[in-house]
Image: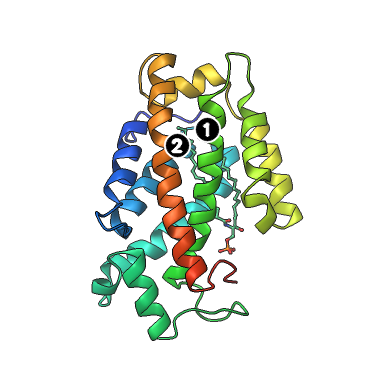
Amino acid sequence: MADTSEEQKFSLREVLDSFRACLSENKEIFIEDYIAGWRGLVRFLNSLGSVFSFITKDAVAKIQIMGNHLKSENREHYVTFQSMVKYELENEQVEFHKRGNLYESGCRTILRLHRGLQWLQLFLDRLRTSTEDSKTSVMCSEAYNESLAKYHPWIIRKAAGVAFCALPGRPTFFEVMNVGTPEQVVAMLGEAVPLIAEVYNITEELYAQHNMLDLP
Ligand SMILES: CCCCCCCC/C=C\CCCCCCCC(=O)N[C@@H](COP(=O)(O)O)[C@H](O)/C=C/CCCCCCCCCCCCC
């Protein structure tokens, strides 16, 4: 595993806090907190070593794009997913049919992370209900096949499959989460899964309303 002594340690609690904070009372999603949740997840992936770096790079690039929107002169429109969608649609910043110059559109970028969040929800749910001898690689690839895989070309699916085989076993996984005993990890996963599902479902509905679930 990569040496993480110089880096901030992963904490599942912190990731959860960010995803909890991203939900507003009226079910809007705050971009800044959502992206903070992703930063925490990337920290976890980083600690697993270089075989995952092609995944980390892509996630970091997308986090960076959103970070730039949050700092831009248009930042007042990038407060929630809802305000971002309204702004980008009204200002023709969304490509619906073909990938062109608007690669850095917030809507397409969040859509990619949103699909990743579905993988996370499915994976964490499997982890929650797993037993001591369950294999993380199997749980991970089942979750991937039910979510992200349908959007990825053969070469990415192949590379992802190879990376999954390098995942540490369940005990190491639980340790890296920095939560406590396996029972405490399972309890926290029981909190995490419905929370992530709520964020996922709100986003899915917003994108469906605007026919944006297939942005190129
Ligand atoms: C408590 C345990 C928690 C587990 C923590 C997991 C940490 C995961 C961190 C990041 C997951 C990556 C999310 C990936 C988002 C993928 C976005 C995407 O689909 N990008 C593709 C399309 O982008 P555009 O070209 O249209 O801009 C891009 O082609 C993808 C390239 C990289 C490959 C992505 C493979 C995804 C595998 C996801 C499983 C991660 C396995 C982590 C194992 C713990």
Question: What residue would you read off at disc 2?
Answer: 193
Residue 115, x across and y down, in percent: 54, 54
Front-lying residue, 175 or 96:
96
Q: Secondary structure at mark 2?
A: helix
Q: Name the residue located 26 percent from the left edge and 67 percent from the top edge.
A: 71
Residue 125 versus residue 115 in the image, above or below: above
- The reply to whether dot 2 and dot 1 touch (C-beta < 8 Å) is yes
Front-lying residue, 212 or 91:
212
Q: Name the residue located 34 percent from the left edge and 35 percent from the top edge.
A: 7
Q: Name the residue located 48 percent from the left edge and 78 percent from the top edge.
A: 94
Number of marks in picture: 2
Mark closer to the chain start, 2 or 1: 1
Q: Name the residue located 35 percent from the left edge and 52 percent from the top edge.
A: 34
Residue type of the residue flagged with mark 2: Val
Q: Secondary structure at mark 1?
A: helix
Question: What residue would you read off at disc 1?
Answer: 125
Q: Label 2 vs label 1: CA separation?
A: 6 Å
Q: Residues within 10 Å of mark 1 (few under 14, many from 20)?
A: some
Res 81 → quadrant:
bottom left
In the rendered view, does 6 fall on the left or right side of 197? left
Say how the picture is coloured: rainbow
Residue 173 versus residue 86 in the image, above or below: above
Residue type of the residue flagged with mark 1: Asp
- Tell me, yes or no, if residue 175 can be seen here: yes
Q: Residues within 10 Å of mark 2 (few under 14, many from 20)?
A: some
- Tell me, yes or no, if residue 166 can be seen here: no
